[in-house]
């Protein structure tokens, strides 16, 4: 199994929303991919709660394989959300690693 983690530092304002509003939008829309993208086994987006954080939002998702992760990345529903995330972010980091089945 593969755990896919992504963290975003958001622009203070973008696309008519504050960073906090964009983080909430990302949470709702990314978590909404469960059941839409068949390869996505689990998905959780956390929004940073302190004032002085480096990153505003963090996605933790799980896939059966790297092939399933690749299919998720090109799924049209994910692509649409990803395009918005690209518009509102200052930076992004990601890490994919193997985990034991749960």
Image: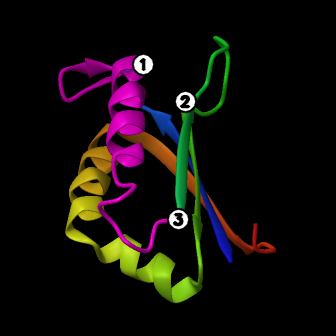
Q: Looking at the rendering, which quadrant does residue 100 occupy?
A: bottom right
Q: Is 30 part of what is drawn in magenta? A: yes
Choose mark 3 or mark 1, whichever is in front.
3
- Residue visible at 34% across and 54% down in the picture: 33
Give the x, y percent position of residue 77. 23, 61
Quadrant including the C terminus = bottom right
Q: For the residue carrying disc 1, how many other residues have a C-alpha within 10 Å: few (<14), some (14-19), or many (20+)?
A: some
- Per the image, the residue denoted by label 1 is 20
Sequence order check, earlier mark of 3 and 1: 1
Q: Is 59 part of what is drawn in magenta? A: no
- Residue visible at 40% across and 22% down in the picture: 19
- Per the image, the residue denoted by label 2 is 56
Q: For the residue carrying disc 3, how many other residues have a C-alpha within 10 Å: few (<14), some (14-19), or many (20+)?
A: some
Q: Secondary structure at mark 3?
A: loop
Q: Looking at the rendering, which quadrant does residue 89 occupy?
A: top left
C-alpha gap between disc 3 and disc 1? 26 Å
As drawn, is 89 to the left or to the right of 6? left
- Residue visible at 68% across and 77% down in the picture: 1
- Per the image, the residue denoted by label 3 is 41
Q: Are marks 2 and 1 in contact (CB under 8 Å)?
A: yes
Please state the extent of the stretch shown in magenta in the rendering.
13-40
Sequence order check, earlier mark of 2 and 1: 1
Q: Secondary structure at mark 1?
A: helix
Sequence order check, earlier mark of 2 and 3: 3
As drawn, is 28 to the left or to the right of 77? right
């Amino acid at each position: 199994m593969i755990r896919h983690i992504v963290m975003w530092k958001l622009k203070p304002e973008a696309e008519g929303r504050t960073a906090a509003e964009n983080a909430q939008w990302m949470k709702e829309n990314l978590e909404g991919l469960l059941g839409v993208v068949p390869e996505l086994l689990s998905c959780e987006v956390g929004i940073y709660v302190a004032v002085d954080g480096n990153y505003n939002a963090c996605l933790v998702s799980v896939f059966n394989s790297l092939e399933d992760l690749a299919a998720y990345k090109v799924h049209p529903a994910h692509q649409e959300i990803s395009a918005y995330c690209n518009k509102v972010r200052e930076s992004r980091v990601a890490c994919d690693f193997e985990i034991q089945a749960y």
